[in-house]
Amino acid sequence: MARHIGIVAVSPEGSALCYRKLARRAMQIADPSQRPQITLHNRPFSDYLDAIYRDDWETIGELLLASAHSLAEAGADFLILPDNVAHHAMHYVESRSPLPWVSMIDLVADAITRDKRKAVGVVGTKLVMHGSTYQTVLGLKGIAVHATQEEDAAEIDKIIFGELVHGQVTETSRKMFHDAINRLADRGCEGVILASTETPLLVNDKSSSLPTYDPVDLLTEGVLDMATA
């Protein structure tokens, strides 16, 4: 029998994208008994945003833990977090969590390593692009991680928090993201991490000038393999 997947939701739009991908892929499993149960739990997104703007990662950790406990009570076997920014708070969470977590960051690093990339770009919020979310784990594998130019980073951050988390998509923003990726390619990047859960609303592997690494895609594949093993 398949194991029960718990989704810790942060951004409504991003979490819905993750749930939809998981559910669609689970339906493709021929044996119904091997289709995992999926439960999603959220705290108000405004609580996360308030804490992010205050740079209060301990509070974000407590919000994640609250969802983790609710999902444990619902019978989940392990947890996933389809949100890049909130991974900054995971060091507050993992040792106190009632359930194990499947790391989206590690799955991305494994995919880039398998493809033998030496340098990749990252497109997401300023905190993720200029922080350690992907930089540390990829750096330990000898892979360079390049953020977008400063002016691109500011505009991308604005689009993510002002549009994408609300499900809003404009052609102006789509062009801006693709132009930023083109500039990463010009700097020698061999691929790009779509390091905001909502980024695939604007960019995908077919439209991008660089091969893309969608963390939520890799997470759904990895967690389904675990749930049905």
Image: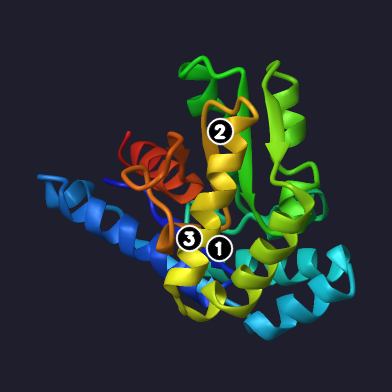
Label tally? 3
Judge from the rendering whether residue 35 lies leftward or rightward of residue 151; answer left or right.
left
Res. 37 mark: none
Judge from the rendering whether residue 193 lies leftward or rightward of residue 150; answer left or right.
left
Disc 2 to disc 3, C-alpha distance: 15 Å
Between disc 2 and disc 3, whose residue precedes?
3
174 or 60: nearer the viewer: 174
Between disc 1 and disc 2, whose residue precedes?
1
User: Which residue occupies 80% across, 47% down?
Assistant: 130
Residue 102, can we see it?
Answer: no
Query: What residue would you read off at disc 1?
Result: 72
Judge from the rendering whether residue 163 lies leftward or rightward of residue 210; answer left or right.
right
Where does the N terminus fall, quadrant-wise? top left
Query: What residue would you read off at disc 3?
Result: 175
Q: Position of residue 218 (x, y in %)?
A: 43, 41
Between disc 3 and disc 1, whose residue precedes?
1
For label 1, count other residues whose C-alpha is less than 10 Å away and answer few (under 14), some (14-19) or many (20+). Answer: some
Res. 185 mark: 2
Q: Position of residue 104 (x, y in %)?
A: 56, 43
Q: Secondary structure at mark 2?
A: helix
Q: Which quadrant of the view contains residue 20?
A: bottom left
Judge from the rendering whether residue 210 lies leftward or rightward of residue 137; answer left or right.
left
Where does the C terminus fall, quadrant-wise? top left
Q: Amino acid at mark 3?
A: Lys
85 or 27: nearer the viewer: 85
Residue extending furthest toward the left = 30
User: Which residue occupies 64% across, 62% down?
Assistant: 156
Q: Position of residue 186 (x, y in %)?
A: 59, 32
Q: Amino acid at mark 1?
A: Ala
